[in-house]
Amino acid sequence: MLKRLTDALDFQAQALNLRSERQRLIASNIANADTPGYVARDMNFAQALRNATGSMQPAATLAASQPGHITGNAATDGASFSTLNYAAPSQTNLDRNTVDMDRERASFADNTVKYEATLRFIGAQVKTTLSAITGQ
């Protein structure tokens, strides 16, 4: 029972860390909207979460299977290189900047809502657990 509870909270914590990292990436894109040659980045959230949780096994860490592989945990080391993508330019411009402010604003708002939902899930899990422990 305790392991299941810990695994569920660890999964939500991993998701929260990744949402935070994605928010940082989007904010960086917005901040560099006028930087010539800047290439916008985003993460494949589903793949990053799978990597961080060991393909749906919460709280697992990534291990190197070959000597040249990068080791680490995507949630603690930031988004892994395999989950970061370059944004394709929506329209060509002379300064080669690929930041599309409409796309970035929509991504920022969407990620914010999902971040807050993850916080609510964690709060509900803690409240349910406390209720079960106290018997109320």
Image (cartoon, helix red, strand yellow):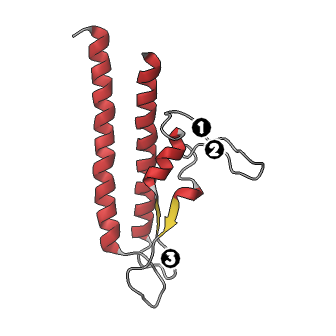
Point out the tag, 1 or 2, that comes first from the N-terminus. Answer: 1
Point out the tag, 2 or 3, that comes first from the N-terminus. Answer: 3
Q: Position of residue 134 (x, y in %)?
A: 28, 9
Residue 110 shows up from this direction: yes
Give the number of the disc on residue 72.
Answer: 2
Against 22, residue 94 (above or below) is: below
Instruction: Count residues near mark 3 (Cα–Cα under 10 Å), then give few for <14, some for 14-19, many for 20+.
Output: some
Give the number of the disc on residue 27.
Answer: none
Q: Are marks 1 and 2 in contact (CB under 8 Å)?
A: yes
User: Residue sitting at 28 percent across and 23 percent down?
Assistant: 127
Q: What whole-number distance in Å separates the C-alpha atoms at marks 2 and 3?
A: 28 Å
Instruction: Judge left or right: residue 60 versus residue 131.
Output: right
| Mark 1 element type | loop
Residue 75 shows up from this direction: no
Residue beneath disc 1: 61
Instruction: Judge left or right: residue 71 versus residue 97.
Output: right
Which of the image's four quarters has the C terminus?
A: top left
Residue beneath disc 3: 38
Q: Residue furthest right?
A: 67
